[in-house]
Amino acid sequence: MRAAVNAVSDVVANRTRPLREFDQIHMKTGDMVMQSEAIASWSKEKRLAFIGDGDAVSVALAYLKERKVLDFGPTKIMVFDFDERTVNAVKRFADKERLDYLDATLYNVLDPLPDVQKYDCFYTNPPWGASNGGASVNAFVQRGIEAVRYDGEGCVVIADDDELDWPKQVLANVQSYASSRGFYVSRMARKLHGYHLDDAPDLKSCNLFFSSVPGNIVNAEESAPLTNQQSLRNFYGGSKEPRVRYVREMKRPDYGKAPQEEYRLELFDHRSEEA
Ligand SMILES: C[S@@+](CC[C@H](N)C(=O)[O-])C[C@H]1O[C@@H](n2cnc3c(N)ncnc32)[C@H](O)[C@@H]1O
């Protein structure tokens, strides 16, 4: 356990700072450890696509295997994310640790999925759709289903709470949407993960696992712009339309180290020194 926590803490130190306006709210470290073990086991020997991954579960899976903390996991991991900081953080970590089966690419789910090799399973922890009944979740799920070409498995991480109405409505709508694409719920692991979320510190998420129905007729539709059902209204919460195609990285930060704009050094003789 100590080796697992230490490895995941390296991964967490490499994460980008979250942008709340795009629903980037990172999973807590202890839950990352448990989640990584669960997802490594579920995706063992498979090709796994992440549709968005600010949490860096993708990196944790690869690193835990490389460090021999886990002796199982996926054979290929690709992260599709619209935040260049996240994409570069994954690539840099993969390069530094020689994780050659881990990669990332810049991609916005509102655009058609690029022509990629087929994946066996997908993972997404999308914007949770509190203000649009889960339409934004379904946009991410749609791209995951396309990545596995309508034949495979998916894990969707979304809100799960007994006291609130909206997570239940979202869960129902996401299950119904996946069913319309030929997928059924194969498992649901409830209330597993906590987040660094100031306004709802107790809100948890579940792992909702889907599998394609055997013989699912591979949908002939090309990967397309999203439909009305995946309404773009309130994509990132109330009144937040998705106007941004990509978040670009301005300069190469050294994750895990405080940026120099954040502090100054005061010397014994009370003069300041440039940090
Ligand atoms: C929306 S956040 C959900 C919270 C999650 N715990 C996290 O912080 O990563 C998940 C990931 O989706 C990415 N994302 C948000 N909008 C996107 C879009 N339109 N296309 C692709 N990725 C997107 C974010 O950059 C982030 O990495």
Image (spheres, helix red, strand yellow):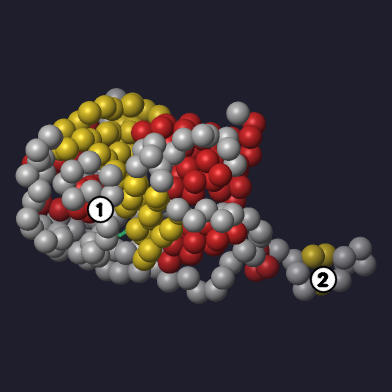
Q: How many dots with numbers?
A: 2
Identified at 60% across, 59% down, the residue is 96
Q: Is the shortest distance between ligand 1 and the CB of mark 2 under 8 Å?
A: no
Query: Tag 1 or tag 2, which sits nearer the N-term?
Result: 1
Which residue is identified by label 1? Answer: 118
| Residue 54 pos. (x, y %) | 43, 52
| Residue 265 pos. (x, y %) | 79, 65
Examine the rendering and report whether any part of residue 58 can be seen.
yes
Which residue is identified by label 2? Answer: 272
| Residue 255 pos. (x, y %) | 60, 59
Image position of 116 with respect to 54: above or below: below
Identified at 58% across, 37% down, the residue is 68
Marks 2/1: CA distance?
57 Å
Residue type at the position of mark 2:
Ser
Name the mark on residue 151: none
Disc 2 is placed on an element classified as strand
Q: Is residue 222 left or right of residue 40?
A: left
Disc 1 is placed on an element classified as loop
| Residue 179 pos. (x, y %) | 11, 37
Q: Nearer the viewer, mark 2 or mark 1?
A: 1
Q: Is residue 214 left or right of residue 147?
A: left
